[in-house]
Image (cartoon, rainbow, N blue to C red):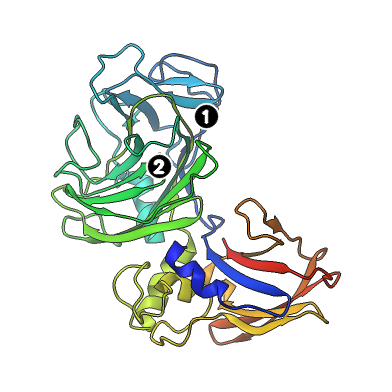
Amino acid sequence: MKRTNQSAFRNALLTCASAVMAISVNNSAAADIFTDNFNVADTNSLDGSDQTGRHTGLVANDVLLRSGGIQMAIAGNQLTFNDSGALVTFPRTGNIRFQPVALPENTQYDFAAGTSGTAMLGAGGFRFEFDWTPNDNSSGDWISLSAGYTEFEVFLRVNDFTTDFGVLFRNSGGSQFFDNGEGTDGESFDVSDGPVQHHARVDFTFSSFADGSAVTATAYVDDVLLGSRNFTWESNSGVLYLELGNIDSVKQLDNVSISTLPAAGVDYQTWATDNGVTGTATDDGDSDGLSDFNEYAFGLDPKSGSSVNPISAQFNKTTGTLSYSRRTQSLSNLTYAVRSSSTLALNGWTTLVKGTDYTETVSTSGEVETVTITLTPVPTADKLFLQVRAH
């Protein structure tokens, strides 16, 4: 969820609670294409590391990760970006390549081919995820993802003019998007807790790998929506290569995952077409302060500037009930978690357990559900904040 959108939800003050809505998307309906958890013995050479038991997915036995520019290590069941055993450039740059097991080391794996390509097209796209821990909060250090290129060796892939799409996540919380080298800034993610582990996710939506085909890429860090960009596959002849990049050393990388796009991504495109919504999911077509994806997830009208509040019944402190709207779950594949806080502090939220901390009733009208939650027991505190988070 864009930070600029959160204030609109926080304005919905209740008698003894305020409701805040946040967006993220569940991966439950996706199929793994390739994963690597790095759960093997420590080694100073990623390229020579044991592959046993590390991989899952449709092409688990066909792909392995190799170092580029800098030899990477594995320590504590995580990959470590470092400069061990390689010529060091300044600034120190390195990358992680997806390479085919059965071909020479100077080739990359084509995810558009075979079972991986068939799965991606069948799902309308794919999702790339990973966890990383930075070594500091500086703006000059970053990790990146690049997609759509043909050159095997490029010094800085993410902003190279031959790279169809790149996204860069800075240690300072900033983000940048690149389309064949042309850069634009994205939203920021929270780094107030220092250099802690973050989770990155990029969703790619498209219907063809052919040159000239339209693609939408949407990036998140820690469930914060950083932005969405439209671009096209160009001069790749239907091939899809992917690469992770890095500047500086002593970053940890873990849980790399490529999967098919969950049903929510496909359903969003259907909803957008039905409602005459164009552009990207982060656009605000009716200028009401909410992105189109926020309106999708919470059953709002993307063409009405007055449709800004999913809370259909204010909190009743006597009965402990609150009602909100959302897109029908059988269509969106989103799941919704109720959380509470007495302070609104970043780390002060507690996820409530359905059936123990609250009960839920749902009524459906077309493609929108109205959900009534009842807190158990009814809260007696003078101040309480509730958040409904879509996953």
Q: Which of pointers 1 and 2 lies earlier in the amino acid sequence? A: 1
The dot on residue 172 is 2
The image shows residue 23 at horizontal and vertical percentages of 52, 64
Q: Quadrant of residue 284?
A: bottom left
Residue 101 can be seen in this image: no
Residue type at the position of mark 2 = Ser
Q: Residue at x 53, y 55 (%)?
A: 27
From the viewer's perspective, is 208 left or right of 225?
A: left
For mark 2, does the 10 Å Cα neighbourhood hold few (<14), some (14 to 19), or many (20 or more) residues?
A: many
> Is residue 276 positioned above or below 359 on the image?
below
The image shows residue 279 at horizontal and vertical percentages of 29, 71
Residue at mark 1: 54
From the viewer's perspective, is 385 left or right of 274?
A: right
- Front-most of 311 and 164? 311
Q: Residue at x 20, y 45 (%)?
A: 163
The image shows residue 365 at horizontal and vertical percentages of 59, 88
Cβ–Cβ under 8 Å for marks 1 and 2: no
Q: Secondary structure at mark 1?
A: loop
Q: Residue at x 46, y 69 (%)?
A: 5
- Front-most of 302 and 333? 302
> Is residue 87 positioned above or below 93 on the image?
above
